[in-house]
Image: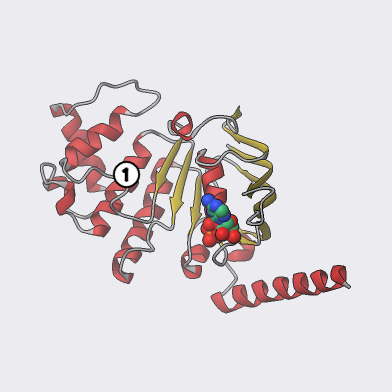
């Protein structure tokens, strides 16, 4: 479903500010995989997401989405295959429009159904059904302006809208990081439900290690532009946060020793 073949990204190449943000990344997500990505600041997580979405075109390597080579395509051309939810609850929705207008906009973007925008009676019923699955009571507020919703409600709506295009890949960019703990937990639960309901292939970046352990069927840890740990479901479900941190320190320690060995 998603394949990254030997992706590398260098910023400011050939200048004193040169930074190799991704180094030969290889990653395959099969249909229905839900991969969580963690790593410290500057590890390359955002660059990885941007390379998948087309916000950044890699210097070398292929990006393949559902058997299409997309590495050369800009972001707007990839958006029909990708649903993305960002950290900022304001990013995914139009605040001056109502809930149903926002949903109608996302609904019309569906790549297989080729729909006209607008809200019909039939669509209202469809939207109500979808909103009911969030258990937030939004189905009774179809005419409310989205700008009046709480951050958690907006993020739930953004998630739903991102799924309306029936994306090949759902990308979640620290989508609970700006929420208070109880809302973050709620959105985490909603995420789990939505991914299951729509059987979505999902790539999620998070700073929350517990969330990375709880959600998804595979956990990836990045450091210095590389994938340094790749744990399948059976291994990650046995781990505690403490063990995960120990593993991170052990690998970094080894890397540090390797660096020292190379440097003599
Ligand atoms: P993360 O999301 O894990 O915090 P990033 O992908 O944002 O890491 O950054 C990886 C590295 O690339 C960092 O050293 C960062 O400073 C650098 N970097 C990211 N974006 C840019 C950019 N637009 N220009 C220059 N350097 C960048």
Residue in view at x 50 percent, y 57 percent: 205
Q: Where is residue 130 drawn, in percent x and y?
A: 26, 42
Q: Quadrant of the C terminus?
A: bottom right
Question: What residue is shown at x 60% (from left), y 75% (from top)?
Answer: 245
Residue 13: x %, y % from top left: 66, 47
> What secondary structure is found at the residue carrying circle 1?
helix
Taking depth in this image into account, of 125 and 25 the one nearest to the observer is 25
Mark 1, ligand 1, within 8 Å: the answer is no
Task: Name the residue beneath numbered marker 1.
Answer: 160
Residue 150 x/y as whole percent = 20, 58
Number of marks in picture: 1
Q: Residue at x 82, y 70 (%)?
A: 258
Observer able to see residue 2: yes
Q: Is residue 100 above or below residue 49?
A: above
Q: Quadrant of residue 180?
A: bottom left
Image spot of residue 18 (x, y percent): 65, 54
Vertical order, 63 against 141 (above or below)? above
**Colour setting:** secondary structure
Q: Quadrant of residue 104?
A: top left
Q: Is residue 24 above or below residue 225?
A: above
Q: State the residue lying farthest toward the right.
A: 264
Q: Residues within 10 Å of mark 1 (few under 14, many from 20)?
A: many
Image point (59%, 72%), residue name? 239
The image quadrant where one finds ligand 1 is bottom right
């Amino acid at each position: 479903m998603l394949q990254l073949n030997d992706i590398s990204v260098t910023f400011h190449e050939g200048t004193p500010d040169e930074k190799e943000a991704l180094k030969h990344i290889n990653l395959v997500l099969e249909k229905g995989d839900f991969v969580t990505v963690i790593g410290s600041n500057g590890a390359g997580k955002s660059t990885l997401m941007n390379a998948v979405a087309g916000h950044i075109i890699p210097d070398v390597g292929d990006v393949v989405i559902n058997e299409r080579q997309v590495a050369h395509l800009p972001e707007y051309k990839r958006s029909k295959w990708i649903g993305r939810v960002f950290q900022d609850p304001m990013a995914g929705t139009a605040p001056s429009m109502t809930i149903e207008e926002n949903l109608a906009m996302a609904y019309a973007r569906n790549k297989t159904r080729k729909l006209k925008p607008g809200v019909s009676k039939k669509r209202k019923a469809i939207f109500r059904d979808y909103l009911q699955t969030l258990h937030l009571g939004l189905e009774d507020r179809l005419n409310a302006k989205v700008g009046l919703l709480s951050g958690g409600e907006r993020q739930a709506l953004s998630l739903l809208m991102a799924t309306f295009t029936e994306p090949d890949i759902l990308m979640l960019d620290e989508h609970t990081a700006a929420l208070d703990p109880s809302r973050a937990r709620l959105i985490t639960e909603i995420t789990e439900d939505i991914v299951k309901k729509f059987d979505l292939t999902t790539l999620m970046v998070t700073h929350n290690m517990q969330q990375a352990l709880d959600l998804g069927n595979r956990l990836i840890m990045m450091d210095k532009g590389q994938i340094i740990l790749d744990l399948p479901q059976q291994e990650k479900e046995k781990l505690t946060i403490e063990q995960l941190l120990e593993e991170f320190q052990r690998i970094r320690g080894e890397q540090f020793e390797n660096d020292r060995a190379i440097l003599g």
